Amino acid sequence: MPLPRRIRLARGVRGQDTVTPLETLRRKAAGCTACPLYRHTTQTVFGEGDGRARSVLVGEQPGHEEDLAGRPFVGSAGRLLDRALGEAGLDRSRLYVTNAVKHFKWRKDRSGGKRRIHERPSQSEVEACRPWLEQELSLIRPEVIVCLGVTAAQAVLQRRVTISASRASPSPRRRAFAPA
Ligand code: SF4
């Protein structure tokens, strides 16, 4: 019986582990110091999912829980995403999810709490990180890129966008859109 596609992707012909180009990229990104954000985080949070996905979801950046786990969309945003995907009848394991910026930008909680507070990445940080996103997209070559927010949309489309003007609007130039 043929192996499921995901297992075929992860193993060579003799069953040994092989390193895919996406995995090689992920390992390189783990050591990235191209902008200051790596300094105060736990780790790079690279994309994950099906390397041959037809659809890629792009968020802004990892949050507190993603930074600790080293995986995208596992915190409250991830739970919201899972619920939305479930309602849409989509299987997350058949998608690829990633972020425009791979390190968590945060500030201290001014009320004294221990939880780190999300801060939006600057344009220069998004630009510094864009080569990682571009390489992910060029390896996966998805049919559709779903941008989850304005930072993701600007990183993907490489132009200034507003969510109010582009919500649910497909961009044929890159087949990207922000969901309603
Ligand atoms: S946020 Fe992106 S560009 Fe900046 S250090 Fe992390 S991986 Fe590198």
Image (cartoon, rainbow, N blue to C red):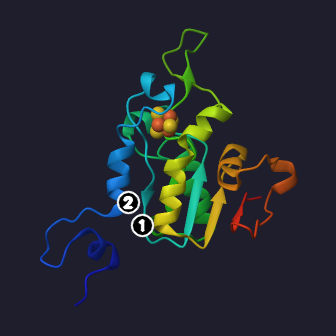
Q: Residue at x 35, y 62 (%)?
A: 21
When the figure is inspected, residue 70 is found, relative to residue 88, above or below; the finding is above
Residue 103 appears in the rendering: no
Dot 1 surroundings within 10 Å: few (below 14), some, or many (20 or more)? many
Furthest residue in direction right, as rendered: 165
Quadrant position of residue 178: bottom right
**Would residue 145 be found to the left or right of residue 66 on screen?**
right
Given this view, does label 2 or label 1 mark the residue nearer the observer?
A: 2
Residue 49, horizontal then vertical, whole percent: 43, 61
Amino acid, disc 2? Leu
Q: Which residue is mark 1?
A: 51
Residue 110 appears in the rendering: yes
Q: The N terminus lies in which quarter of the figure?
A: bottom left
Q: CA distance from mark 2 to mark 1?
A: 7 Å
Q: Residue at x 38, y 41 (%)?
A: 70
Q: Nearer the viewer, residue 89 or 15?
A: 15
**Would residue 26 be found to the left or right of residue 77 on screen?**
left
Q: Is mark 2 within 8 Å of ligand 1?
A: no
Amino acid, disc 1? Gly
Label 2 or label 1, whichever comes before in sequence order: 2
Dot 2 surroundings within 10 Å: few (below 14), some, or many (20 or more)? some
Q: Nearer the viewer, residue 151 or 108?
A: 151
Q: Which residue is mark 2?
A: 22
Residue 135, horizontal then vertical, whole percent: 49, 57
Residue 111, horizontal then vertical, whole percent: 61, 10
Q: The C terminus lies in which quarter of the figure?
A: bottom right
**Would residue 53 be found to the left or right of residue 122 on screen?**
left
Q: Mark 2 and mark 1 in contact? Answer it, CB < 8 Å.
A: yes
